[in-house]
């Protein structure tokens, strides 16, 4: 198997950036809502659901950047491969959120590059800190995302089965990522770092809902 040079990795990363921010990703797995008929939603309901899915999409952009940054600086190949696998699975989430937003006649967040850059810096820093801390960031990130998705499930009208199916599958995948990171030796992050991550996530979610 060919060993990729640093330049190869940079080129591959830039390709991932362009596809992530340019809405050019394609899901590897079938959309969990593909076979579900559209619900009769009011204009107000559509706007709210679109806002929630825009937040989810922004979160997936950040997740891509976080995992890619961690993969670039991971100390061991096992952790590097783990991060890349998580990033690949998150691509499905990106594609599903994009498709649902299009169905709702809405758009992704205009601040995508900002979400990406911020998360990439965090991912690189976490990777440099060491694999156990990098994995710890994965666990805490996924736990926060899971709580966030659960709140969205409670807010989306039950009749909107398409959106529910997508969010439920995303929640399942995030739980799997957290479990894998824990099993791989993730360190428990200090409370101040968890608190800072939570505050940062709140800023992103409140902004992405509208912009």
Image (cartoon, grey):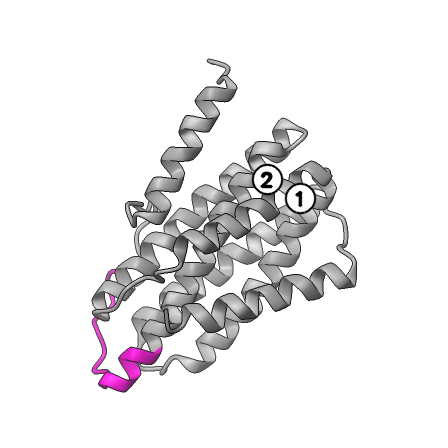
Q: Position of residue 201 (x, y in %)?
A: 56, 65
Secondary structure at badge 2 equals helix
Q: Residue at the spot x=37%, y=46% of the render?
A: 20
Residue for badge 1: 126
Label 2: few (<14), some (14–19) or many (≥20) C-alpha neighbours in 10 Å = many
Residue for badge 2: 70
Q: Are marks 1 and 2 in contact (CB under 8 Å)?
A: yes
Q: Residue at the spot x=77%, y=63% of the render?
A: 191
Query: Is 193 displayed left or right of 112 in the figure?
Result: right
Q: Position of residue 112 (x, y in %)?
A: 40, 55
Task: Write down the region rendered in magenta.
Answer: 34-48
Q: Residue at the spot x=79%, y=58% of the render?
A: 190
Secondary structure at badge 1 equals helix
Up-down relation of residue 122 to residue 9 (above or below): below
Q: Residue furthest top?
A: 2
> Which of these two is toward me, 103 or 23?
23
Q: Is residue 43 magenta?
A: yes
Give the CA separation, mark 1 to mark 2: 6 Å
Q: Position of residue 132 (x, y in %)?
A: 73, 42
The label shown at residue 71 is none
Query: Is 81 displayed left or right of 162 in the figure?
Result: right
């Amino acid at each position: 198997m060919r060993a990729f040079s640093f330049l190869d990795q940079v080129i591959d990363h830039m390709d991932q950036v362009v596809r992530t921010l340019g809405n050019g990703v394609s899901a590897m797995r079938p959309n969990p809502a593909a076979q579900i008929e559209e619900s009769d939603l009011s204009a107000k309901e559509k706007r709210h659901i679109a806002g929630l899915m825009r937040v989810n999409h922004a979160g997936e952009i950040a997740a891509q950047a976080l995992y890619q940054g961690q993969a670039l600086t991971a100390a061991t190949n096992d952790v590097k491969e783990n991060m890349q696998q998580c990033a690949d699975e998150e691509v499905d989430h990106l594609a599903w959120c994009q498709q649902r937003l299009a169905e709702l006649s809405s758009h992704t967040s205009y601040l995508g590059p900002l979400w990406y850059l911020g998360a990439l810096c965090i991912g690189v820093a976490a990777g440099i800190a060491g694999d156990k801390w990098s994995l710890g960031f994965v666990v805490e990130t996924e736990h926060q995302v899971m709580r966030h998705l659960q709140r969205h499930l409670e807010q989306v009208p039950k009749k909107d089965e398409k959106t529910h199916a997508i969010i439920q599958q995303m929640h399942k995948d995030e739980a799997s990522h957290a479990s894998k990171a824990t099993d791989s030796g993730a360190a428990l992050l200090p409370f101040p770092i968890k608190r800072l991550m939570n505050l940062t996530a709140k800023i992103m979610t409140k902004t992405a809902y509208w912009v």
